[in-house]
Image (cartoon, coloured by chain):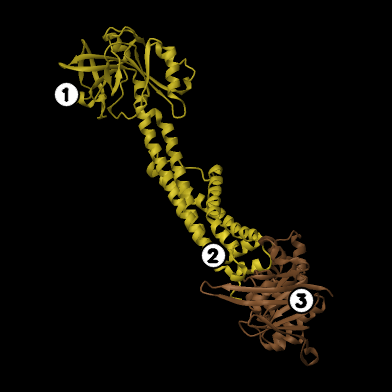
Chain colours: A yellow, B brown
């Protein structure tokens, strides 16, 4: 028989109260666990799919000319710059220290041309890289497989009245429409994409590039550092980070995280209140019992130990229950929130389990300090007045 | 035998907020080691207040209580708890057993905060339960026992720490006369073994086992008697 036996036996006796306290705290812990698990899964998904958001670094020739616009970003003068960038520069990009972070390099040559008596922007690309970079492209038809095949934007299709497998003339050469882009809502809708090599030949710019788009995995790496390293390798080029896309995604993520923290704090406060109320009620019910303990020589600290031990045991159970319920809930909720359907989170995430137990015990002990203090300060004569 | 307990000029006033009520007024008496003393008096005479003061549960408004040369109310709150654990065993009218603990666990309660090994605590408790004649019921819950048996358990709990003083507040108040007799005999036998016992009682039949009776009225000692009731002689005033 020791103080912990008393706590344990009392919990066994007051099962309903213990279950109520466990439930209150477990709901809070499970909420926190669910939010953390889902947040982490969302972060992981963002990290995994950063490349799908397109380029986050753009390399253009250095120029003092006015900028043209491409995709809402400033692109230096395409053809009039004093400096030029070339296809071989793509190999130099692969030589930077953080080359492992470079996922896709998509070089482009931009030129205006007349097709079916309309001025159109013709972009020479490496189709493999371009399609890898722009995973959101939905293509009707097929990807170009041979020379003299093109992909046209949805707007081009309408304005030039071109359909699949129809041919058009570009600077005296005939191209066939192999694929048509479904509307993207971007500048791509008004562009004709042809093979980079052919574009360089047709427009008389062998090896030349207008810009290079780079997709770097920068979820956990400093994009500025990659930009700096690339700039060193390409002194004649201007290297810019497009933070907008990622930052808007990350901003949404951070907002969700902040929302999660807010919800967690509120739920934990409510749980703490439930623990305080239940423990206080328990202390009030046990006034005579505490009076007996005090009469037979238990110190105030002994009474506090009994009450806090009960809180500890209860909260430990609540932490474990909350963890498993939370992980279970996350497994149900994740597929609804995540684009990839939510990869199943592991059942045993030991750091999270440890954190859940620690958080539950911390909240429970904190919430029980007042009832425990109150119990320890009970005047034994008042407590025993009913004797 | 020397004095184990001495009350000197003890006064206890309760402030109800509206008025001050004196529960005890200038109480002085001594209890020798091994004595069996009864405190009697009508309801409201201050018997229970007196017992709580003797047991270190309540603070007097004036005066002092000395037990084994310790000025009880000069002790800090925590030391006062230690004093109760080491010096006093309480027996209450309504037994005050902890209903969710078994008999042996109830008896072990005062040992819960000691550093004695668990097995040893259990052995001491079972010895004590044996002494009060309940050896076969150590694993029962209090609710499964009769009132007399519960009071025996309460007595075992009061004695398990081997305190020099046992304070019993109406120990037979909730029992029938036959069971009351058994409990008083048990207390008498414990007194024979050397325990100093102070009981509060209404029942003159309980005086058979006691050595001395202190009568209270209106918070004052009305008289002290030497009891010879065991020999069928009425209390003799001193």
- Whether marks 1 and 3 lie on the same chain: no
Residue contact at pointers 1 and 2, CB within 8 angstroms: no
- Under tag 1, what secondary structure? helix
Task: Find residue A231 and name its label.
Answer: none
Q: Which residue is mark 2?
A: A282
Element on which disc 2 rests: helix
The residue wearing badge 1 is A159
Query: Secondary structure under badge 3?
Result: strand
Residue B111 vertical position relative to residue B31 in the rendered view, above or below: above
Where, by quadrant of the figure, is residue B163 drawn? bottom right
Instruction: Give percent across and percent down for residue A311.
Output: 57, 57
Residue ID for mark 3: B30
Up/down of A82 relative to A32, above or below: above
* A333 sits to left or right of A292: left
- Tell me the quadrant of the picture where the C terminus of chain A can be found: bottom right
Residue extending furthest toward the right: B1
Nearest the camera: B183 or B87?
B87
């Amino acid at each position: 028989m020791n103080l912990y036996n008393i706590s344990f036996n009392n919990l066994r006796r007051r099962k309903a109260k213990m279950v109520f306290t466990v439930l209150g705290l477990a709901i809070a812990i499970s909420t926190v666990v669910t939010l953390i698990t889902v947040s982490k899964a969302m972060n992981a998904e963002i990290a995994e799919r950063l490349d799908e958001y397109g380029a986050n670094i753009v390399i253009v020739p250095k120029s003092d000319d006015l900028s043209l616009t491409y995709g809402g970003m400033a692109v230096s003068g395409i053809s009039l710059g004093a400096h030029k960038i070339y296809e071989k520069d793509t190999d130099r990009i692969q030589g930077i220290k953080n080359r492992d972070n470079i996922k896709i390099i998509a070089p482009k040559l931009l030129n205006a041309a007349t097709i079916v008596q309309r001025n159109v922007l013709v972009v020479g690309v490496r189709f493999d890289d371009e399609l890898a970079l722009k995973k959101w492209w939905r293509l009707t038809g097929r990807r170009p497989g041979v020379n003299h095949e093109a992909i046209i934007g949805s707007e081009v299709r309408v304005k030039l009245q071109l359909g699949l497998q129809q041919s058009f003339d570009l600077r005296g050469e005939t191209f066939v429409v192999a694929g048509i882009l479904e509307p993207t809502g971007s500048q791509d809708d008004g562009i004709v994409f042809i093979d980079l090599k052919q574009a360089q030949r047709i427009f008389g710019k062998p090896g030349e590039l207008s810009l290079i788009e780079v997709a770097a995995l920068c979820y956990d790496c400093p994009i500025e550092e990659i930009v700096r390293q690339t700039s060193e390798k390409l002194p004649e080029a201007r290297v810019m980070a497009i933070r907008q896309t990622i930052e808007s995604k990350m901003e949404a993520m951070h907002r969700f995280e902040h929302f999660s923290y807010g919800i967690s704090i509120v739920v934990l406060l409510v749980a703490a209140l439930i623990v305080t109320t239940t423990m206080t009620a328990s202390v009030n019910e046990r006034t005579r019992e505490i009076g007996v303990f005090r009469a037979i020589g238990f110190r105030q600290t002994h009474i506090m130990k009994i009450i806090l031990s009960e809180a500890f045991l209860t909260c430990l159970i609540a932490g474990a229950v909350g963890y498993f319920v939370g992980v279970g809930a996350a497994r149900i909720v994740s597929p609804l929130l995540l684009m990839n359907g939510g990869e199943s989170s592991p059942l045993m995430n030991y750091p999270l389990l440890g954190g859940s137990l620690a958080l539950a015990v911390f909240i429970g002990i904190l919430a029980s300090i007042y009832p425990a203090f109150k119990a320890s300060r009970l005047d034994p004569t008042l407590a025993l007045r009913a004797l | 035998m020397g004095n184990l307990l001495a009350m000197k000029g003890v006064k206890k006033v309760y402030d109800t907020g509206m008025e001050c009520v004196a529960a005890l007024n200038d109480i002085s008496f001594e209890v020798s080691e091994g004595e069996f003393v009864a405190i009697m008096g009508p309801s409201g005479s201050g018997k229970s207040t007196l017992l709580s003061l003797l047991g270190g549960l309540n603070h007097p408004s004036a005066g002092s209580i000395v037990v084994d040369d310790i000025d009880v109310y000069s002790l800090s709150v925590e030391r006062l708890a230690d004093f109760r654990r080491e010096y006093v065993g309480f027996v209450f009218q309504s037994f005050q057993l902890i209903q969710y603990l078994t008999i042996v666990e109830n008896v072990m309660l005062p040992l819960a905060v000691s550093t004695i090994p668990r097995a040893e605590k259990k052995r001491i408790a079972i010895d004590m339960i044996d002494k009060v004649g309940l050896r076969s019921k150590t694993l029962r819950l209090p609710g499964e026992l009769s009132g007399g048996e519960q009071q025996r358990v309460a007595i075992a709990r009061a004695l398990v720490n081997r305190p020099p003083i046992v304070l019993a507040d109406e120990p037979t108040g909730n029992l029938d006369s036959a069971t009351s007799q058994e409990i008083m005999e048990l207390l008498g036998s414990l007194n024979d073994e050397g325990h100093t016992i102070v009981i509060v009682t209404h029942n003159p039949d309980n005086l058979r086992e006691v050595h001395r009776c202190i009568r209270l009225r209106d918070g004052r000692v009305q008289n002290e008697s030497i009891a010879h009731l065991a020999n069928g002689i009425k209390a003799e005033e001193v």
